[in-house]
């Protein structure tokens, strides 16, 4: 029960931060940052959220059902634009891989352990 509380509080704080900064970043993303900071600082122990995190990960497929229904419901819009959508997906994926690889090469050799 404590794990759900920590997740919901993190989400709520993320949504609040999102509104404070004018919606520049989604509240769910900021909530993950808040939870990460709480875990790193020891405010929240990993064991406290392990049960609920495992349950959510085990049932992650359920989160894709609304996306699938939305895609099927909008097939008339997606169909004619499929080439543009696929091209965008391919180009942006390759761009992300290239940027992450470049950043890793630039920062990978400068670690001080």
Image (cartoon, rainbow, N blue to C red):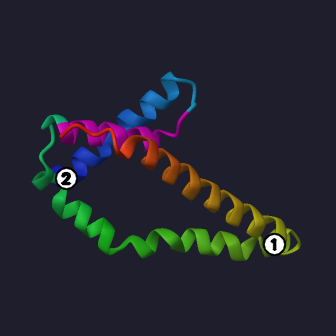
Q: Residues within 10 Å of mark 1 (few under 14, many from 20)?
A: few
Q: Is residue 11 visible?
A: no
Q: Give residue 77's position: percent from left, percent from top.
A: 84, 68
View extreme (top): residue: 20
Residue 54: name its quadrant.
bottom left
Q: Which mark is residue 53?
A: none
**Which residues fall within the magenta stretch?**
25-40
Q: Give residue 2's position: percent from left, percent from top.
A: 15, 50
Between 98 and 54, the one lying in front of the other is 98
Main secondary structure along the magenta-highlighted residues: helix
The kind of secondary structure element at disc 2 is: helix
Q: Residue at x 36, y 46 (%)?
A: 108
Q: Nearer the viewer, mark 1 or mark 2?
A: 1
The answer to whether residue 28 is magenta is yes
Quadrant of image for the N terminus: bottom left
6 relative to 76 in the view: left or right:
left
């Amino acid at each position: 029960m404590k794990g759900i509380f920590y997740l919901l509080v993190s989400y709520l704080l993320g949504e609040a931060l999102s509104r404070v900064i004018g919606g520049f970043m989604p509240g769910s993303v900021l909530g993950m940052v808040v939870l990460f900071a709480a875990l790193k600082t020891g405010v929240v122990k990993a064991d406290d959220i392990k049960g609920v995190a495992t349950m959510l990960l085990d049932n992650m497929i359920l989160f894709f059902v609304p996306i699938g229904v939305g895609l099927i419901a909008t097939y008339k819009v997606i169909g004619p634009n499929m080439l543009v959508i696929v091209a965008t997906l391919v180009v942006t994926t390759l761009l992300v891989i290239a940027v992450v690889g470049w950043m890793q090469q630039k920062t990978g050799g400068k670690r001080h352990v």
